[in-house]
Amino acid sequence: MINIDIHSDLLVILRAALFLLPLFCTFYFAWRHKSDNRILVGSLFSFLYSIALLLPAHAMAVRLGAWHYGSETLILLGMPVDLWFAGSFLFGPATFLVFPKLNPLIFTAIFIAIQALFFNSLDPLVIAGNYWLLGVTLIFLLVHTPAMYLAKWTRYDINLPQRATLLAIAYGSLAFFIVPTLIMHAMGGSWDIGQRSAAEIVAVISSLLPCIIIGLSAVHMFVIFGEGTPIPLDKTKHLVNSGLYSYITNPMQLCTAISWIVIGVFLQNFFVALAAGMAGVFVAGLVRWHHRNDLLVRFPKGWPEYKTNVPEWLPRWKPWIKEKSILYWNTESISQSIYI
Amino acid sequence: MRLGCMLQLLFIISIPPLSLYLSLGFPFVFLLVELFKTKLPISISDPIERMLIK
């Protein structure tokens, strides 16, 4: 390990550079790759995954005493916000766009080695605590390496189930951790889960579980029947109108809205619960815009018919099935005969 | 939609005390653009769109 005594003024410049250089690299190399849509979508996904997972990972590391930051400005859950964005740009789109063919495992090894060498020199920007090297390694393995893989897989349009899984993890973290955290930072409130009783925690998990299962099932439908991801930038090849989608058009948005209400009630925070209204605004704004400009254009016959028969928010009692389906059963099977 | 997002980002960067609130209110930009495109009469929305984009 190298322990250089860096002047505090230089650390200020270093902190600014850590944010501005990856930002500049991302925009410059995105412009250079402007004709390659898949590489741009891949880099955007790597950023979204990083931004969703980096803050909770660092908050956990700070809480466990792996390290802490010396700065007191722009702090969110113990992490400077500029470094949150810097890390998300640097170890995601910036590295991917500069070295699109780099193996994510080699990237991980190189950056862990660099951090291991210089981490102690960054005091007072970041002050190492117990097991900081383990913390750095875990953050790379859980946040940055999957982000690089996500970018690479999206670029080459391969490993769809793994891509959808990583996007679902990122969405879950963004919707149910980052958004409530930002709302509470702006309007007041905190994640004081330690003060809640075990019964309250069990109740909130039991209430969230159906929403999580429905949300994941919706993602599953996109992968299996649509051969794509729920994110319109990495769109499905077919119109998904079966399974959950034969009952309701927006199962993921509905689950998100209900989850925000549940989390708001659990945290006794009115503003977090109010975010459910924002899900409505999001559907009325961006989702309908996407429906009109993408789904209606790609599926001019199937989409309007589906839209007329399946509601947006209130699920149907019976699924809407366009073509008559026939159910066959094995008359010799005892287990099947009980349903007849 | 792109223009709306760019304007909102510009506001977020240029008004730091309100940046968090403006970021949280991002979905309203989408709603505003959607209402502009679908609810406003074409005789009003078309000239505005042409003036802003073309």
Image (cartoon, coloured by chain):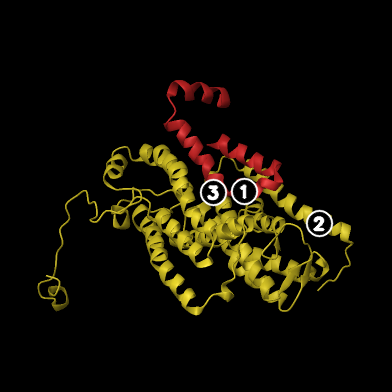
Q: Nearer the viewer, mark 1 or mark 2?
A: 1
Dots 3 and 2 on the same chain: yes
- Mark 2, residues whose alpha carbon is within 10 Å: few (<14), some, or many (≥20)? some
Residue at horizontal 41%, vertical 41%? A288
Up the image or down, A118 lies above or below B16; here it is below
Whichever of labels 3 and 2 marks the residue nearer the N terminus, that label is 2
Q: Chain under label 2?
A: A
Dots 1 and 2 on the same chain: no
Q: Amino acid at mark 3?
A: Val
**Which of A110 and A198 lies nearest the eye of the viewer?**
A198
Report if the CB atoms under discs 3 and 2 are less than 8 Å apart.
no
- The residue beneath circle 3 is A41
Report if the CB atoms under discs 1 and 3 are less than 8 Å apart.
no
Mark number displayed over residue B21: 1
- The residue beneath circle 2 is A14
Chain A colour is yellow
Q: Amino acid at mark 2?
A: Leu
Spatial CA span between label 1 and label 3: 27 Å
Q: Which chain is red?
A: B
Dots 1 and 3 on the same chain: no
Spatial CA span between label 1 and label 2: 28 Å
Residue at horizontal 50%, vertical 54%? A274
**Which of A157 and A283 lies nearest the eye of the viewer?**
A283
- Mark 1, residues whose alpha carbon is within 10 Å: few (<14), some, or many (≥20)? some
Q: Give the position of the C terminus of chain A as an image quadrant.
A: bottom left
Up the image or down, A142 lies above or below A100; here it is below
Q: Nearer the viewer, mark 3 or mark 2?
A: 2
Q: Chain under label 3?
A: A
- Picture coordinates of residue B32, whole percent (x, y): 50, 37
Residue at horizontal 36%, vertical 52%? A226
- Picture coordinates of residue B10, whole percent (x, y): 66, 39
Q: Amino acid at mark 1?
A: Tyr
